Image: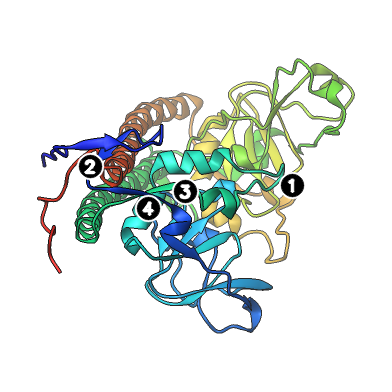
Amino acid sequence: MAQTHYPCSKPSGVKWLGDVPEHWEVRRLKYSANLINQRVDGSASDLPYTGLEHIESWTGKRIAPNGEVSSEGQASLYARGDVLFGKLRPYLAKAHGADAGGVCTSELLVLRPRAVRQQFLVYYLLNPDVISIVDSSTYGAKMPRANWDFIGNLPVLIPPRDEQRAIAAFLDREAARVDALIENKQRQIELLQEKRSALISHAVTKGLDPNAPMKDSGIDWLGEIPAHWTTCPIKRVSTRIQTGCTPPTAEERYYEDGTVPWYGPGSFGTDVVLSEPVKLLNETAIREGTARLFAADSIMVVCIGATIGKVGCIAGPASSNQQITAITPNPKKASGKFLAYQLKRLEHVLRGIAPSTTLPIMDQQEVGYLPCALTTLEEQNLIIEHLDRLLRKADAMTGRIHESIAMLQEYRTALISAAVTGRIDVREEGSYGQT
């Protein structure tokens, strides 16, 4: 799709806007839309509520259905046709065109378009130049936000109304096309993750020989395993099962010039080997006993909190916080990475072991009794090499898809910016002049 440029332009008088189409106006936002300050008691209102978290960044989409959420305290009233714009810095890339009335957090400005159409204004506010300028104006240390005095004085480009309609319609179509491509790529990532899980599950419970005779393991979690494999509680092939601990965070002497990785629940992801420590500790923390050092190849299991059941292993000596239990395997009997692969496929099962309480906990005894299937060390290593090779390929493919998604998102944002600032002319793209 080839866009053209406007034949005649003029200086906008605004440095970051540069030249703009000759027939476009430049007005302040406060003269283009009214700020609506109608406050209500959110807890007493039966209108649908919109919070910052219910607007998707950079797209303007609402991501929570009306009626699923409620408000406590003061809220702002908005009507159909209004534009909601987030003034809190982490959410500044949030603008939404309301298609029905409701109430919203006071961190959203309610703008009622006057000289500009709703959807054109939404797209204009999602222009990254606008977001950047508003972001630079924020104040406050903990919760920086912008104020209306600044935002209201932002310059807004005003094309003729039928041209605004054409631009918004063009961007609606292009955004929908890009979003469909992104959705398709996200589904590809989901399928790759499913394939990844299937590869791990099959290799660590069935082995690599498709013709190997099988037997019932007697354990629902494992199902059938090769006839020459054995099963046992993981403690039988371990030399140590111990929970980590946290050095006092105020004591900098435990963290200065740290070289020992210290992991927390946030360190666990898709990969079986942990690679993102929360912090680095030094030998003083280990020597004084404020942290525990676990041997390379130990299995790490999150045993407390919301991410209970997450599994990984460590490539080198490392430490962890008290939410994690480390299992150090007997190197003569089992590979930690093999056991970690085996337990990783059971993360959803491990989450069900802990009692349903406010703070679910899986103790060391429960960890020790986790069943595992074992074969010879030689075969364990062959399975590890096989999985590492296949998963590297799957991860590389996933990485390329993530890169293409990022490029599509950048294209979407750049297209919005170009269309609402007159750098491209889309009047011939289908709806210019329609009523």
Q: Are marks 3 and 1 in contact (CB under 8 Å)?
A: no
Q: Are marks 4 and 2 in contact (CB under 8 Å)?
A: no
* Separation of residues labelled 4 and 3 (CA atoms): 8 Å
Q: Which residue is mark 2?
A: 22
> Label 4's element?
loop
Can you tell which of label 1 and label 4 is closer to the viewer?
A: 4
Q: What residue is at 41 percent from the left and 45 percent from the top?
A: 201
> Label 3's element?
loop
Q: Amino acid at mark 4?
A: Thr
Can you tell which of label 2 and label 3 is closer to the viewer?
A: 2
Q: Are marks 2 and 3 in contact (CB under 8 Å)?
A: no
Can you tell which of label 3 and label 1 is closer to the viewer?
A: 3
Q: Amino acid at mark 1?
A: Gln
Front-lying residue, 173 or 336: 173
For marks 4 and 3, the one nearer the N-term is 4
Q: Is residue 82 visible?
A: yes
Front-lying residue, 374 or 159: 159
Front-lying residue, 365 or 60: 60
* Separation of residues labelled 4 and 2 (CA atoms): 29 Å
State the image coordinates of residue 306 (x, y, percent, origin top left).
64, 55
Q: What numbered label is drawn on residue 364?
A: 1
Q: What numbered label is drawn on residue 59?
A: 4
Q: Is residue 17 above or below residue 377?
A: below
The C terminus - image quarter: bottom left
Would you call the spot at circle 2 few (<14 residues within 10 Å), some (14-19), or many (20 or more)? Answer: some
